[in-house]
Amino acid sequence: MSVEKSVLERYSKGAESVQSSLCCPVDYDSELMSILPQEVVDKDYGCGDPSRYVQKGDVVLDLGSGSGKICYIAAQLVGEEGAVIGVDMNDDMLSLARSYQSEMASRIGSDRVSFRKAHIQDLKLDLEVVDRYLTDHPVINSVDLSRFDTWKFEQRNKAPLVADSSVDLVVSNCVLNLVEESDKRILLEEIFRVVRPGGRVAISDIVSDAPVPQRLKADPALWSGCISGALQEESFVNAFTEVGFQGVSLAKWDAKPWQTVEGLEFRSVTVTAYKGKGTECIDRGHAVIYRGPFSQVNDDDGHYYPRGQRIAVCERTFEALLDRYPENFIGIRPHGEVEPKMWCASAGTRRPASETRGGEHRSRESSGGCC
């Protein structure tokens, strides 16, 4: 049985009746959960709570949205100005989630959620449009197949289901491990494509403490049960940096394994990261000071920051560090106007104090202070 077929069958059963073996214990915000229909709660199968990273006004994309629980939680957090898109390939789960859409819209004050059918590793192709096409143009020979392939190519380019750089936050709850091993890189590239510059991801998933052996990967029941498709924890983190995400962090790492299979520990983690804004490196005389406690830290762009030193950075790096890690860095703007120039400092380049003396400081104290 193929991976996709085993996953579809197992989660269709999960839409019909509760499958407790697919759940990890997770604490969700009780107030946000209180207005959710009980069936949506009972038939959700996750291992974390990526919804806690949702901000007001966000456009949120939930990959593998299932019963719609995370979508309906996120809809309360994004407010009137935000929107939530749930993507799933399973018709039964989509039907379950959509059956409560009108009720939830009434409860939260507006319809902020849409559910779409697609493979999460192919967010350009709307599978409901595909279904309609195949009804009208059944594929019965190689000519039909070639015509269908051409049509899919045009659909992906002319009418993508999720457009480039259109999403503020991508979340997912225990779904990436269900994707075929050969498609995992494609999936992460798709996530990177749809996130806007400056946008974020919060992905809860199951990881293993060591690589999963092939004999376990070949077991459809273990794969559809969120076990044998899990990436090893270091590989999982590295996969996000490899496609271009920055600031990749293990925001959550469960100390207690969810399951142990043949001595391998499988546990829930949540990874957060952001997409750089893609602006050019322009030097305007900025400097940052890394506070500590470590002697030095490195970033994903190859810069390093020795503790206590004024390090020259371009404006883009300055804004990224101070926006995202204000407790770790002191930012110093130049005194007066500095003629901008295209330049990215070599790693560890110091900024002379004379160039920033009297400049505006941008800082958030980490633990009190006197002056």
Image (cartoon, rainbow, N blue to C red):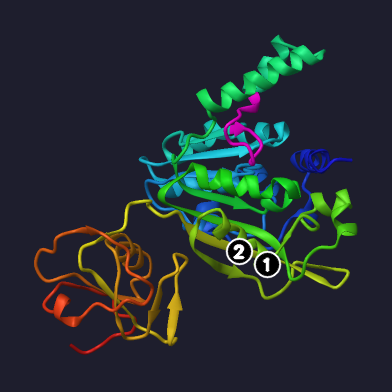
What residue is rendered at 52% in x and 34% in y?
A: 162
**Residue 233 x %, y %:** 68, 67
User: Mark 1 belongs to which amino acid?
Assistant: Glu
Q: Secondary structure at mark 2?
A: helix
Q: Is residue 39 left or right of residue 330?
A: right
Residue at mark 2 to residue at mark 1: CA–CA distance: 7 Å
- Which residue is the site of mark 2? 237
Q: Magenta includes 56? A: no
Magenta segment main secondary structure: loop
- The range drawn in magenta is 116-128
Q: Residues within 10 Å of mark 1 (few under 14, many from 20)?
A: many
- 337 or 177: nearer the viewer: 337
Are discs 2 and 1 less than 8 Å apart at CB?
Answer: yes
User: Mark 2 belongs to which amino acid?
Assistant: Val
**Residue 291 x %, y %:** 35, 83
Q: Is residue 319 left or right of residue 159?
A: left
- 333 or 24: nearer the viewer: 333
- Which residue is the site of mark 1? 233
